[in-house]
Amino acid sequence: MQFTHLHWHSTFSFLEAIWTPKKIIQKAKELNFENIALTDLGGIYGAIAFYDSAKESGINPIIGTELGFVLDINGYNKIENIGNVCLLAKNEDGYKSLMKIVSHANQEWISGKAKCDIKMLEKFNQWLIAFMWGEESWIGKMIFRSEADEKIIEIIKMIQDKIWKENVFLELVAQSELENQNLKKINNKIIELAQQLEIKCIVNNIYQYINQNDKEVWEMALAIKDGNKIYDDHRRKPKEKYHLMSGQEIFDIMVDNWYSEEQTKNWINNNNEIAKTIKIEIPMGQTLFPNYSTPPHIQELYEKVKNNLISE
């Protein structure tokens, strides 16, 4: 089953994920993926390494990032209320847009979390794809707080108006809902909202490491980041599976969560269809400094000084 991961983190999401883009691309090649995305937290620092590795392997690279999101960056925002948004570049212009957005977002950070707002996204709407998902997203946090549907719909429509409706998606998280009841609540509400607003859903497991047996190492990284020890009872101990899953694994998890096979195939197909619209070609091996045209009087002065130096 062909599947496109549109949401994942590498070692460039500092101590929140492990394995380099090159290793992840190698695993993606083993799984016969045709496309795969990189959406590191707060930056696109691994984008070139990811791009090079993907191109060498014959895989279509999809470059993105996951940022904190607020409606108005100048307003007062508590860190616990800042949800995330995931952005994907549709082409080279989108990649350049991500660089500008990430630079701005990291200047506006709060408690170490880069954040952007609707006005920033509106400037680059034609080159970006945006989606929101589970517990860490803006929409997910509103759902978890049981906020009124009317308020959530208002926010979604606002984002659609600014980023263009066809570029906005809602994401379902492929993890066991028996182990995470919060996720079940959010996934079900996202499906309801998507149907009501005629928004397409995508599905990802938001992987953080490559193989299932990498989970212990990943938990060690989380403990180090949080200043905990691996034997501390209060450290982060995620029950979910965040390895690089095959399309069949994603499918099986969603069916196990009592979603129909037809629904699940449709969501997976939406991932693949998005990938088909994305084509990024980054010019490599070029000098990209601007061609500066020297004013005549400066050029004249330069030639005069140069000639004097030669004669001496």
Image (cartoon, rainbow, N blue to C red):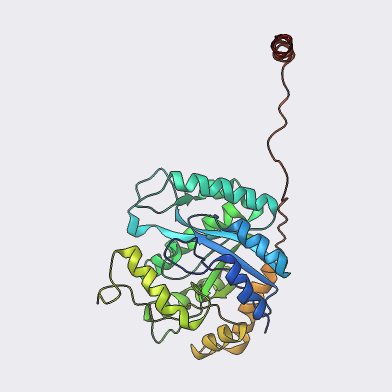
Say whether residue 119 is visible: no
Please tell me whether residue 48 is drawn above or below residue 231 in the rendered image. Answer: above
Residue 128 percent coordinates (x, y): 62, 56
Return the residue nearer the eye: 77 or 232: 232
**Across the whole image, how many numbered discs are drawn on residues?**
0
* Residue pictured at 55% horizontal, 62% vertical: 39
Quadrant placement of the N terminus:
bottom right
Please tell me whether residue 80 is drawn above or below residue 232 in the rendered image. Answer: above
- Where residue 152 sits, quadrant-wise, is bottom left
Residue 171 percent coordinates (x, y): 53, 71
- Where residue 20 sits, quadrant-wise, is bottom right
* Residue pictured at 67% horizontal, 76% vertical: 29
Return the residue nearer the eye: 152 or 124: 124
- Where residue 202 sits, quadrant-wise, is bottom right
Please tell me whether residue 164 is drawn above or below residue 286 in the rendered image. Answer: below
Residue 237 percent coordinates (x, y): 34, 77
* Residue pictured at 46% horizontal, 78% vertical: 214
Return the residue nearer the eye: 260 or 52: 52
Say whether residue 235 is visible: yes
Return the residue nearer the eye: 180 or 302: 302
Q: Is residue 1 left or right of residue 151?
A: right
Quadrant placement of the C terminus:
top right
Name the residue at the front extreme. 312
Residue 270 percent coordinates (x, y): 65, 73
